[in-house]
Amino acid sequence: MTKIKELIEDFRLNQEILGREKKYVDLCLFRLYRWEEFTVKVLGITETEDVTQLHIKKYIQERQRVGSEVNRTINNNLATLKVFFQYLVSEEFIDEQDNPMRRIKNLKEEKKVIVTFNDDEVSRIINDLKEETYSNVRDKLILIMLFDTGIRVSELCNIRNIDVARRHILIHGKGSKQRLVYISNIMRKYMRGYEALKQERFRKRLLDEVEDYYFLDQSAVRLSRSRINKILKEHCENAGVRKEVRCSPHDCRHYFAQKQLRNGIDIYSLSRLMGHFDTQITSKYLRGLEQDDILQIGRLHSPLNGLKIKHDKPS
């Protein structure tokens, strides 16, 4: 028999060995230790092998009773527990049939329509930047890249010089997953301008004085997420974006997804571009499309488009 706390520490060590991001590991540990505290203090269960499906359900009920967490938040906690217990199964601490999460279903979540930027707002945001300084050109490229590729702000911060090729960029995504995103013609144009200014700006510095990241601040240090948030919010305010749009980098991701769907991309391809683990995550962006958009996509991709079908005129 093994104490729950001991196996949480074993899980933590394994996640670090796998190279998981510290932020992800810390979030997992927060969720697991909160669950462990309830399981030990309230239910009196200290051994992992004694945890049953009923105990998990009581924990769900406790999170609901607290009242401050929506179903989506509780489901995120359940996802961490599922990963934890699946790890215990794979390491043979418990048998598959003894996995208490095996038949635990997610709670029903409220399906919210995602409100994001429209085309006119995106144009105003990007055009708000005048290409007068190194920072201006860099910031304009950052906004173009967020809207044009749908990458996460953390992924953008972590792009290294070696990740950038002529036609694509290697993205280091969630869970140490890598993927490629395309470089469009307009993005390539602004990348050339930025790269030339960047080289000129730091040409007198020694190599070890310039960080090996693609986007650098005035001191040749990698840009932070908070700085990119501020860049976007500043130009959203100047562009007069609607109040219902939060103006976060993740909203650029929403815009990218919905625009790609309007342009007729399939869910599977969009999932690959966005770095989602499955198409169910991506499909939520469909809720933001109007019925007319769906019908137009259907017309553009009708199975009979392009087929030669004989038309006999009525006699």
Image: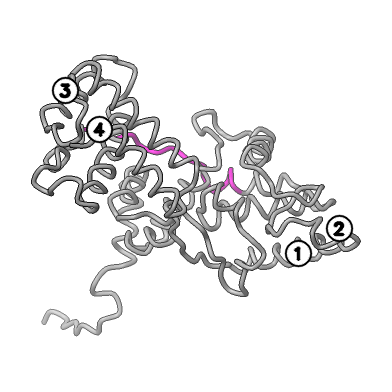
The residue at 43%/37% (across/down) is: 115
Tags 1 and 4 touching, CB below 8 Å: no
Residue 224: x and y, percent? Answer: 65, 43
Q: Is residue 226 left or right of residue 250?
A: right
Label placed on residue 201: 2
Q: Quadrant of the C terminus?
A: bottom left
Q: CA distance from mark 3 to mark 1?
A: 56 Å
Tags 3 and 1 touching, CB below 8 Å: no
Neighbourhood count class around disc 2 (C-alpha, 10 Å): few under 14, some 14–19, many 20 upward? some
Magenta stretch prevailing secondary structure = loop
Q: Secondary structure at mark 1?
A: helix
Q: Is residue 232 left or right of residue 4?
A: right
Q: Secondary structure at mark 2?
A: helix
Residue to which mark 4 is pinned = 3
Q: CA distance from mark 2 to mark 3?
A: 60 Å
Mark 4 or mark 2: whose residue is earlier in sequence: 4
Q: CA distance from mark 1 to mark 2?
A: 10 Å
Q: Amino acid at mark 3?
A: Lys
Label placed on residue 195: 1
Neighbourhood count class around disc 3 (C-alpha, 10 Å): few under 14, some 14–19, many 20 upward? some
Residue 221: x and y, percent? Answer: 74, 49
Does the magenta-highlighted stretch encompass residue 135?
no
Does the magenta-highlighted stretch encompass residue 110?
yes
Mark 3 or mark 1: whose residue is earlier in sequence: 3
Please state which of residues 183 and 211 is positioned toward the viewer in this rendering: 211
Residue to which mark 3 is pinned = 58
Q: Is residue 155 above or below residue 48?
A: below
Please state which of residues 71 and 122 is positioned toward the viewer in this rendering: 71
Q: Amino acid at mark 2?
A: Arg
Residue 278: x and y, percent? Answer: 30, 55
